[in-house]
C-alpha cells in the first residue's frame, strides 16, 4: 500500500512539473488583488453596525481590523513586488489572506466560519496539490483556534443553554465535518482539472515540437546556404542563453529576462541570419573585401530576415516568440553607439533581445574560424569584447559576457566546427 501511495504521489508531482514559474507569479498578483478587494467588506460592516445588525461588536474593533488588514496587504504587496519569483511568496500571500479571514471570525458579534474554505480554494490557482494541502491544514488550524477563542468569550446565544465547553465541542465537530467534506470535494475537482491541464499540455507540446522542427529546418537552411559559418547559429543561440542568465546574476534586466522570455530568445536566436538566404553565393562566400554595392546588398539581409519570419511563421500562435524572432533578425547588426545598420538605432532604441543577439553574434564571429581569418583565442576574444563596451555593445552586456567566461568556453568547444583540443591563438 505504501508503494502504491508513493507511486501515485510521484505521478501527481510529475503532472505539476510543467507548471511554469510565470503561473505562480501571476497567481501571487491575483491573490494580492483579491486581498485588496476583500477590504471592501469593511464599509458593509460599518453600515451593518450603524443599522444595529452587529450589536456584539464595536466601531473601534472594526477600525482595528481594518488596520490589521491594511498591514497584511502591505506585506503581500512587498512580497509580490520585490520577491515575486521566490517560492515563499505564495505562502506569504495566502497566509496574509488567512489572517484576514481569521481576524473576522474572532469577533463574537460576527458569524464567520465556513469562509475558511475560501483560502484553500484560492490556493488552487497555483496548480500545486502539495501546496494546497499545506494551506488547507493551516486554514483548519486557524478555524479550530478561532472556535476555541470564541468559546472563552461570553455569548448570549448559548450561555443560558449549554456550557462553553459543550459549545466549543459542538461547533468544532460540526464545522470540521463541513470543512473536511468541502476539502474532499475541492480535491476531487482539482485533480480532474489538473488532469485536463496535463492533457492540454501534451497537445500543446506536440504543436511546439512541430514548430521547433520548422524553426530547425530554417536554421539548417541558413547553414547550408552560408557554409562558411558552420555551427554559428547553434553556438550563437547558446551564447544568448548564457548572456541572459549572466545579466540576471549581475542584477540587470531581472524583470525583462524571466525564464520564459529567455527560453523564447534561445529558441528564436537560430533565425537571426535567416535573411542571408536571399543573398547570392558570390557575395556570401566571397573571401576578399566586399565592394560598396555588395556591402549594401549584405546590409539588407536583416530586413529580408524580418520579412521572411513575418510571412512564413504567421501560423505560430506564440506572438511573443514571433516578435522576439523578428527583432533579433531585424536589429542584430545595430550598435549601441548608433553606427550599426540598417537603421542606425542608438542605445535603448534597439530592443533588448536584439542587443543581446548582437553580442552573441560578435562573440561567435571572434571565436570562430572564417576563410578570411583565424579563430581568436578566448583571451583575445574577451579582450576585444571589452573594447566594444559603450560603442558596439551595451556596457552591461559586455560585463555579463566577461562574467561568463567558463560557460562560453564550454559552448565554444562543444559546438566546434572541427574537433580541437584548444582554440588557436592569432599570432
Image (tube, grey):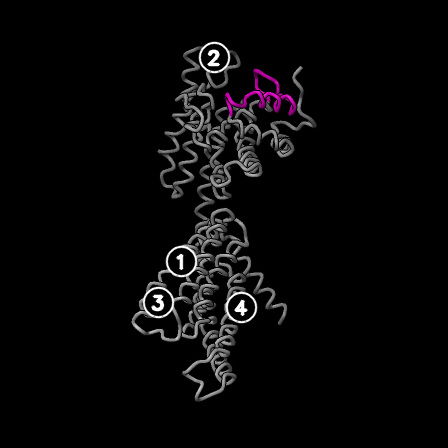
* Of labels 4 and 2, the one closer to you: 4
x 51%, y 25%: residue: 393
* Secondary-structure class at tag 4: helix
The image position of residue 100, as x and y in percent, is 45, 63
Residue furthest front in the image: 60
Q: Say whether residue 120 is magenta.
A: no
Residue 47 appears in the rendering: yes
Dot placed on the residue nearer the N-terminal end, 3 or 4: 3
- Per the model, the C-alpha gap separating discs 3 and 4 is 28 Å
Dot placed on the residue nearer the N-terminal end, 2 or 1: 1
Residue 124 appears in the rendering: no
Q: What secondary structure is the stretch in magenta mostly built from?
A: loop
Disc 1: CA contacts within 10 A as few (<14), some (14-19) or many (>=20): few
Query: Which residue is disc 3 drawn over?
Result: 45
Query: Which residue is disc 4 drawn over?
Result: 137
Labels 1 and 3 touching (C-beta < 8 A): no
Labels 2 and 1 touching (C-beta < 8 A): no
* Secondary-structure class at tag 3: helix
Amino acid at each position: 500500500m505504501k508503494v502504491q501511495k508513493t507511486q501515485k504521489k510521484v505521478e501527481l508531482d510529475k503532472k505539476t512539473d510543467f507548471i511554469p514559474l510565470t503561473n505562480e507569479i501571476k497567481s501571487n498578483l491575483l491573490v494580492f488583488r483579491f486581498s485588496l478587494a476583500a477590504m471592501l467588506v469593511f464599509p458593509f460592516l460599518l453600515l451593518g453596525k450603524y443599522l444595529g445588525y452587529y450589536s456584539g461588536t464595536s466601531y473601534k474593533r472594526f477600525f482595528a481590523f481594518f488596520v490589521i488588514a491594511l498591514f497584511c496587504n502591505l506585506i503581500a504587496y512587498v512580497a509580490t513586488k520585490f520577491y515575486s519569483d521566490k517560492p515563499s511568496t505564495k505562502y506569504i500571500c495566502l497566509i496574509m489572506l488567512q489572517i484576514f479571514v481569521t481576524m473576522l471570525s474572532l469577533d463574537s458579534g460576527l458569524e464567520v466560519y465556513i469562509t475558511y474554505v475560501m483560502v484553500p480554494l484560492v490556493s488552487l490557482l497555483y496548480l500545486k496539490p502539495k501546496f494546497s494541502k499545506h494551506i488547507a491544514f493551516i486554514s483548519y488550524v486557524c478555524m479550530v483556534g478561532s472556535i476555541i477563542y470564541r468559546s472563552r468569550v461570553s455569548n448570549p446565544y448559548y450561555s443560558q443553554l449549554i456550557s462553553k465547553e459543550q459549545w466549543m465541542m459542538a461547533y468544532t465537530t460540526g464545522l470540521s465535518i463541513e470543512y473536511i467534506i468541502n476539502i474532499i470535494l475541492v480535491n476531487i475537482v482539482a485533480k480532474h482539472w489538473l488532469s485536463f491541464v496535463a492533457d492540454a499540455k501534451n497537445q500543446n507540446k506536440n504543436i511546439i515540437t512541430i514548430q521547433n522542427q520548422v524553426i530547425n529546418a530554417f536554421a539548417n537552411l541558413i547553414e547550408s546556404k552560408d557554409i562558411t559559418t558552420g555551427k554559428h547559429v547553434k553556438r550563437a543561440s547558446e551564447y544568448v542563453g548564457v548572456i541572459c542568465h549572466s545579466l540576471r546574476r549581475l542584477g540587470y534586466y531581472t524583470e525583462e529576462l524571466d525564464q520564459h522570455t529567455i527560453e523564447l530568445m534561445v529558441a528564436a536566436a537560430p533565425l537571426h541570419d535567416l535573411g542571408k538566404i536571399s543573398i547570392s553565393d558570390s557575395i556570401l562566400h566571397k573571401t576578399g573585401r566586399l565592394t560598396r554595392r555588395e556591402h549594401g546588398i549584405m546590409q539588407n539581409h536583416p530586413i529580408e530576415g524580418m520579412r521572411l519570419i513575418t510571412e512564413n511563421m504567421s501560423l505560430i500562435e506564440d506572438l511573443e516568440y514571433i516578435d522576439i524572432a523578428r527583432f533579433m533578425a531585424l536589429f542584430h547588426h545595430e550598435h549601441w553607439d548608433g553606427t550599426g545598420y540598417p537603421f542606425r538605432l542608438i542605445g535603448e532604441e534597439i530592443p533588448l533581445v536584439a542587443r543581446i543577439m548582437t553580442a552573441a553574434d560578435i562573440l561567435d564571429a571572434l571565436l570562430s574560424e572564417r576563410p578570411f581569418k583565424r579563430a581568436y583565442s578566448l583571451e583575445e576574444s574577451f579582450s576585444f569584447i571589452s573594447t566594444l563596451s559603450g560603442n558596439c555593445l551595451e556596457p552591461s552586456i559586455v560585463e555579463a559576457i566577461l562574467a561568463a567566461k567558463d560557460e562560453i568556453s564550454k559552448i565554444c568547444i562543444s559546438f566546434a566546427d572541427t574537433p580541437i583540443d584548444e582554440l588557436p591563438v592569432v599570432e
